[in-house]
Image: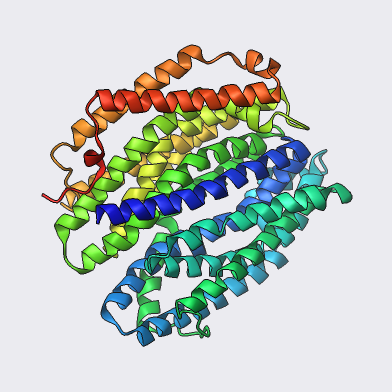
Amino acid sequence: MSKKLLRSGLIVSSMTFISRILGLVRDVVIAHLMGAGAAADVFFFANKIPNFLRRLFAEGAFSQAFVPVLTEYEKTQPKSEVKKLVAAVSGTLGCIVTLLTIAGVLGSSVITALFGFGWFLDWYNGGPDAYKFELASNMLKITFPYLWFITFTALSGAILNTMGKFAVAAFTPVFLNVAIIACALLLSPHLAQPEFGLAIGVLLGGIIQFCFQIPFMRKEGMLVRPRWDWHHPGVVKIRTLMIPALFGVSVSQINLLLDTFIASFLQTGSISWLYYSDRLLEFPLGLFGIAIATVILPSLSASHLQKSGDEFKKTIDWGIRMVFLLGVPAMLGLIILAEPMLRVLFMRGEFSLGDISHSAMSLWAYGSGLLSFMLVKVLAPAYYARQDTKTPVKFGIIAMVSNMILNIIFVFPFGYVGLAIATALSASLNAGLLWFGLYQRGVYKKQADTVFVLLRVVIAALLMGGTIFYFNPLLLEWSQYSQFEATYKLALFIISGGAVYLFCALLLGLRVRHFKISTT
């Protein structure tokens, strides 16, 4: 099992790495084109709304509810019944998302007023930034239909993942990045408002992703005719699990939307600075946290069905060890090298040195919560695999209320950075509650040497972080380097930091066997 999980994890991480690299290229192109000004704020807003709903209706709550039920059908039912389930789910979900998409396009002004209330007030009162509200409303009409295509893409990806075909779903996001980059370079320069070219790229990327997975679904014999069947037993079970999961699994996304709502009242650039720092945070989160969560959910679901409690506990323990092994050094590296990474990636075109300083501050805050974000991704599947969606909802409510209170506490002294601080702290609270819930129920009991393994990982990471911090130049010095020199030095820091971490880990006695699922 350990080798299979490692192999699956490497596949997902490799495909995700390609996607994340292209995602960074995409953000570099956007930063060059629009910097962190008003147009960038509006585009990121118009892109965030359908992506939030994507997490609800596609990759997030739906996937967490659908995969355990699909796994159960695959293990206990003939293939004909599995295909009927897929047909019923795709038809029922498809009808709901179609209606939602139409409503979103027609009601784009209402949605913009709801989540960008600061812009709406400015428009209503005839203020100088009233155009932001109008621009966001129009752009949302283009980006919102992305939700329809990405929902079916996520459905196909969940089916393929359950069947062990992880590479296809992990590689699919590459096409979104390619589409946005192509439109930014080829279409935007010819438009009076270049940001609309990016919005078209989002929609085009959704269409391409949807089409890409069709041949693979046909190969697996799962390309079926969708049909509405609200009362299909599998659909009933999925929606029963999904309704509370709609909230529980998307707490971090709801928190980000709350950040956007509050940021619409703050200075121009706040949404963009938060976006660029969040994008760097998403790189290790997707590469490690989401990859690990993706491969353990089917395994946890199978262990639960087979009533193999020990295997279930060992799989969770493996996930936690892997998160610490990869997440702690990534967190420290992200915080210490925040300014150099932002300088190398984005300091060109309209993106200024001041934008780097502003983005770095929010990245420091976001980065402090990286380990917690990753743990949430790994611990939540342990509940969903057991078809328990109510407990994460309770924890999610506590975390979201805490985030709202912390937003109020930190936004006044720290502005937009306070929003990032509140998000990181609420994620840590959520991760702690998820872990304690599993421990209290006896679902997860740490292996005997887990604490010592994690402690050695932390010490090795701190030694690495101290070394990087000591040699890292100030931002002013980084800004004076040529692009080649800055890129070279940053790469050297990352490689050297990785080498120091590996050396210290080995020196402290960490070995490959510590990151395999125990057989005893």
Measuring from the top left, give residue 454's x and y in whole percent: 25, 33
Please state the horizontal and vertical placement of residue 315, each as a whole percent of the image: 24, 52
Residue in view at x 35 percent, y 82 percent: 233
Is the N terminus in the top left, top right, bottom left or bottom right quadrant? bottom left
Q: Does 183 sit left or right of 305 as displayed?
A: right
In the rendered view, tell whether residue 382 sits above or below residue 446.
Answer: below
Question: At 47% from the left edge and 38% from the top edge, which residue is drawn?
Answer: 423
- Who is closer to the viewer here, 488 or 398? 488
Camera-side residue: 179 or 43?
179
Viewer-side residue, 264 vs 84: 84
Residue found at the far left of this picture: 520
What is the x, y in percent for residue 321?
A: 28, 41
Q: Residue at x 28, y 53 (%)?
A: 3
Residue 256 appears in view:
yes
Q: Is residue 443 left or right of residue 484?
A: left
Is residue 484 positioned above or below 249 on the image?
above
- In this rendering, the answer to whether 204 lies above or below 21 is below
